[in-house]
Image: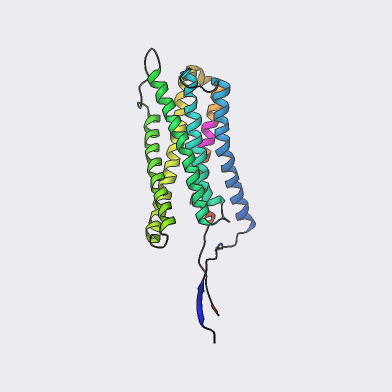
Amino acid sequence: MGKNKMHTHRHYEEENEWGCGSWLEYTMVVVLASVLLLGSLALTLFWVIYYHNGFAWREDLSKQFNLHPVLMVAGFITFSGFSILLYRICRCCRRIYVKLLHTVFHALSIPCVAIGFMAVLDTHNLKRPEAIPNFYSLHSWIGLVTMGLFAIQFVVGFFSFLVLLCCEGATSAFRAALVPIHASFGLTTFMLAIAACVTGLTEKVIFTLGNSYSRMPEEGIIVNAIGMSLIALAILIGYILQRDEFRFRAHVLIRSGDL
């Protein structure tokens, strides 16, 4: 006589089969968002290298400042943007791997933001004959709020990820309640980062070009293109995250059998 036992196992599958139109829409918006995430960083690099002679540290303060826009776009936009998109791109991966990649991309953002922040502080404080005041502009205020929210998001996300690894079953209710809050503040932080970048680009190009900016010089067009790519990203990322159909959905199937 064999004993009847209940066997449970996880089986991940999508709840709804997608048609060609859904796959086309998903592919277009995800690919376009990825291109813009990389393109905005590439345009920023081109701008500071071609028009402002690249990078340095302290031996040339104007070149040191160039690290600020590039690293802030890399950290707050490119790495953070991909960390957000991972939950829509990695549809065939186990969720634990997606969480790990999400954490890695956020971790890559930290040195970019930290060095970019130190670069601009150094530039302001060491400028001679007169130091430039810190934290007086709308750009700097938005940037400070963005960095604060980013730090809180990373600490909360990293803590919940560690809890997941240590005691997954005991903390499931807590983590489930935390997910919508973490996701909402993550999107808010990304939108604030775009606002900080756009205001910073405008501030820099006005200081650099002055009245000639109104005559649409080549550099001004490049900076405007960077700004528009960031605004397009805000629209696309918001759309992708709000589209419920793009989420990876999994459910547990319970199968019984005899032994």
- Give the vertical position of 142 relative to 203 (above or below): below
In this rendered view, identify the residue nearer to me: 202 or 150.
150
Residue drawn at x 37%, y 34% is 144
Determine the main secondary structure of the stretch shown in magenta.
Answer: helix
- Give the vertical position of 121 relative to 239 (above or below): above
In this rendered view, identify the residue nearer to me: 119 or 148.
119
Residue projecting furthest to the top: 129
**Relative image position of residue 39 (x, y in whole percent):** 58, 35
**Relative image position of residue 211 (x, y in whole percent):** 48, 17
Camera sees residue 217 = no
Camera sees residue 121 = yes
Residue drawn at x 60%, y 59% is 18
Image quadrant holding the N terminus, namely bottom right
In this rendered view, identify the residue nearer to me: 186 or 2.
2
Q: Which residues are the magenta region? A: 226-231
- Give the vertical position of 180 relative to 78 (above or below): below
Residue projecting furthest to the right: 20
Indicate the colouring scheme: rainbow
Location of residue 124 (image quadrant): top left
Labels in figure, total: 0
As for residue 176 lying within the magenta part, the answer is no
In this rendered view, identify the residue nearer to me: 110 or 237.
110
Image quadrant holding the C terminus, namely bottom right
As for residue 229 lying within the magenta part, the answer is yes
**Relative image position of residue 203 (x, y in whole percent):** 44, 25
Q: Is residue 242 left or right of residue 178?
A: right
